[in-house]
Image (cartoon, grey):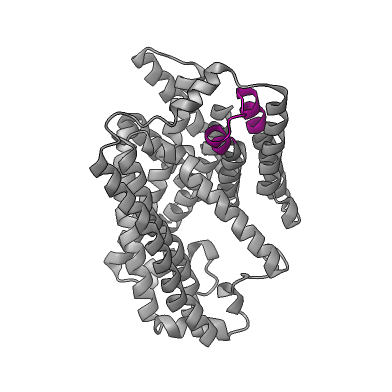
Amino acid sequence: MTVVAVVVAMGVYLLSVTEGGATLMSNVTGLSYTICEVLAVALFTIMVITAGSKGVLITDTIMFGLFTLVGITAVIVVAVKGGGWYNIIEDIAGNSATSDLLSWHGVLGYMYDSGIENMIWFWAYGICWAGVGFIGPWQCSRNLMAKDEHPVIRSSVLVIIGCFAINYLVELGAVFMHAFDIGDTEATQVWLWAARNVLPSILGVILVTGIIAAAVSSATTFMSLVGSSISNDIFKIKDGKKNVLVARISMLCLAVIVAVVAALNPPNIWWIMQIGATVVICAMLPVAIGSIWSKSITKAGAFAGMCAGFTVSFVMKVVTVAQGITVPIYFDVYLVGTVSNIIAMLIANKLTKPTQEEIDARAALFVVPEGEDDPQKVETTRKYLKATVWIGCGIFVFSMVTWVIPYMMG
């Protein structure tokens, strides 16, 4: 069941990344979208088949450093050239046509008609993406490469800063484009317009390179996860050479499917991406939490919960996106899928009892591996965790100073 969820979600994510990369390549080179999406898929496939997981990890690290640095720098340059950070926000806030872009409730009517409904959506998908951070397969695959648990926990604290910087600053920078005359530029391409028309040439080139690096990083991760899941968890191939061969064939098949779908399907990057996250979290998050903190969850309960969460969320998300349907917030796909998972899990748990093997497997999760209980390592990790309190306070103050105060003034 896990493999089914992973393969479907990673395939959907790969489609989203391919469409995004191909759109960018088409704009930069002038080639047709179809040619660019075939080139993009070919690039992703060649890289992951020849470089493997270590190659993916290297591209991830380079991408994160490059994209974070250039993203923050680009936002500052855009703000300066647009008339100043405070001035831009005050102008946007003071204009009735744009003020909702930075309001607490967002643009009413784009998703829901009331601020409360939008806030419920924000909180629900905030939890969804937090879940991606700690049980998303593409995150866990990195954690499994770490030498022990300590660097995993410490790095997660630092990632809080990186995620905030990227999401807050880069998206705010996109809104800042209202300070310029961008004509009829599509909303998804405003940063590309800025790279060409606002940023210094070298910074614009690095920004576009960073976006492509992000696409490569994500796509190769998704493909490698599909290949390893099929060869290790479906066919359970023990022979090393055969295992790699089956994984490569699986990735090639996935690449062909994605290339065909991307060519036939007009780019719909944002909503396709939401399908991937929703399906994974609805299928896995309640079960992942229950498997650690509940003594009553059974294998049957976990399977039933995952089946229900996956099926309900996937079918609902595909139908609503394909038909352009907006369901009432209380029946949002993520909420319905999660509740379905929990109900199915509870029912199956009532009908079954944990076996001794399952009880022992859960107990083993609480045994600290040898070498990880070193007092010095533990104390260092504790310091990182204590730092999250100050990071949270810092993010609050930073947001007040750079967003809320100038918006209220405007």
Give percent across and percent down for residue 2: 55, 29
- Residues shaded magenta: 287-307
Left or right: residue 53 compared with residue 351: left
Q: Residue furthest top?
A: 239
Question: What residue sits 58% from the left and 85% below the top?
Answer: 95
Left or right: residue 226 compared with residue 328: left
Question: What residue sits 36% from the left and 63% below the top?
Answer: 71
Is 269 within the magenta? no
211 above or below 55?
A: below
Observer-nearest of 91 and 145: 145
Left or right: residue 119 compared with residue 132: right
Left or right: residue 342 compared with residue 369: right
322 above or below 386?
A: above
Question: What residue sits 47% from the left and 43% below the top?
Answer: 134
Observer-nearest of 197 and 285: 285
Snapshot quadrant of residue 102? bottom right
- Asked if residue 325 shows in the view, the reply is no
Observer-nearest of 111 and 282: 282
Give percent across and percent down for residue 163: 42, 57
Q: Quadrant of the N terminus?
A: top right
Q: Residue furthest front?
A: 375
Q: Main secondary structure of the magenta part?
A: helix
Question: What residue sits 61% from the left and 22% below the top?
Answer: 354
Give percent across and percent down for residue 248: 41, 24
Is 299 within the magenta? yes
Give percent across and percent down for residue 78: 38, 75
